[in-house]
Amino acid sequence: MPNYGAPSEDLAALLHSQQDGKFIARVAAVNEDGTVSLEWGADPILNVPCSGSYTNRQEGQTVIVERVAGQIIVTGTTATQDTDFQALIDEALDPIQDALNDTTDFAEAVNDDVTRLENIRTRVTFGTAAAPSGFLQADSVWFKDQGGGRVDLYLRRSTDPGSGSSAPPTSTKPPTHKVPKPVTITPNSRGSWRSSGQKDGDVWQGDWTGRGNWRGGWFYGTKIADACSGKTVKSMTLYLSRTKDGSGWNRGVPAHVNLHNETSKAKPSPIGTMHSVKLAPGQVVKYQLPSAWISALASGSARGFMVSGSGRSDYLKCAGSAGKLVIKFS
């Protein structure tokens, strides 16, 4: 089976920096000149030429991309067409990325907690048992590197070493902190409202026909704040995705995302600052929420997410997978 490269790396960087080989990508658009635009991550790769054997060119196809002598070319489709190709890759990589993040957090904790003392000539004994008779318990310890392999130690006690018992006090281990596992929250409901009064069960924004702009939202009840109660939130990631059914322009359109404070399905009103996330047809984006949004959602002053826009330039329909929220703790 050919080696199609690592899906977690950027395809454009692979194609321009690695040796000749094959990769997989998805067709975002078929251009009038016969070339195609490929989708990989957040940034498309535009105007890629195709071989003569690849004739039935269609948007959404999963294709084989070859790099030969510095030139990239699409040679054909893969055996399986997958409409949520990027989403499947992201889902497969999530546990690997979480394991890497956990390893990094552990290494940072060890680096913060451990101080190495080298070339100490003073006699130092380490152990887990109580100190022998005659030893005193120090409240704080300092050391100074004098150079030439000499290290001076200074031990501070709150009482005079000559007064009181020489028996060290019984030490107790500090309580360990167990990091809660990540939580995935899906919306209880979703829907859209048009300025003309029309309603829909999917999430839309903007307007294509002139009948009024759409405003859509996802509703979670109190699940987000409940999940964060008593915990320290490290990050929140919102999954945003767009349908491939021809709703709007066949190019990237910005989804204008706001917070709202509705706990049940109702026409939402935006609160706070709006953020825009560009979505191509069929694309899935994992959006890392800003700290102000995390604080608002964790405290309960905001309850969910909404999108809104004006006219054809903002017109899009969100896919059913949009609205999933992943919360990580520290």
Image (cartoon, helix red, strand yellow):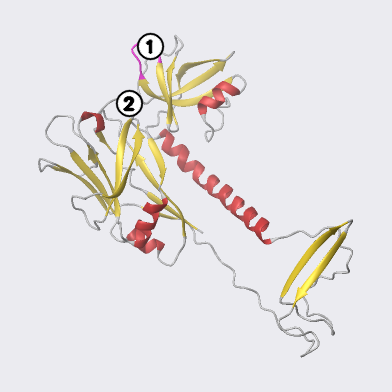
Magenta region: which residues?
Answer: 30-35
Judging from the image, what secondary structure is the residue with disc 2 in? loop
**Residue 235 x/y as whole percent:** 45, 52
**Residue 84 x/y as whole percent:** 39, 35
In the rendering, which numbered label is found on residue 249? none
- Which residue is the site of mark 1? 34
For the point 37% across and 32% down, the residue is: 83
Residue 174 or residue 29, whichever sits in front: 174
Residue 126 or residue 219, whichever sits in front: 126
- Which residue is the site of mark 2? 251
Q: Which label sits in the foreground, 2 or 1? A: 2
Question: Quarter-wise, where is residue 26 in the image?
Answer: top left
**Residue 154 x/y as whole percent:** 79, 71
Looking at the image, tell me whether mark 2 or mark 1 is earlier in sequence order.
Answer: 1
Left or right of 210 in this view: 306: right
Q: Relative to residue 289, is residue 6 depicted above or below?
A: above
For the point 78% across and 86% down, the residue is: 167
Q: Is residue 255 magenta?
A: no
The overriding secondary structure of the stretch rendered in magenta is loop
Left or right of 123 in this view: 276: left
Left or right of 153 in this view: 174: left
Identified by mark 1, the residue type is Gly
Q: Relative to residue 186, is residue 311 depicted above or below?
A: above
Q: Residues within 10 Å of mark 1 (few under 14, many from 20)?
A: few
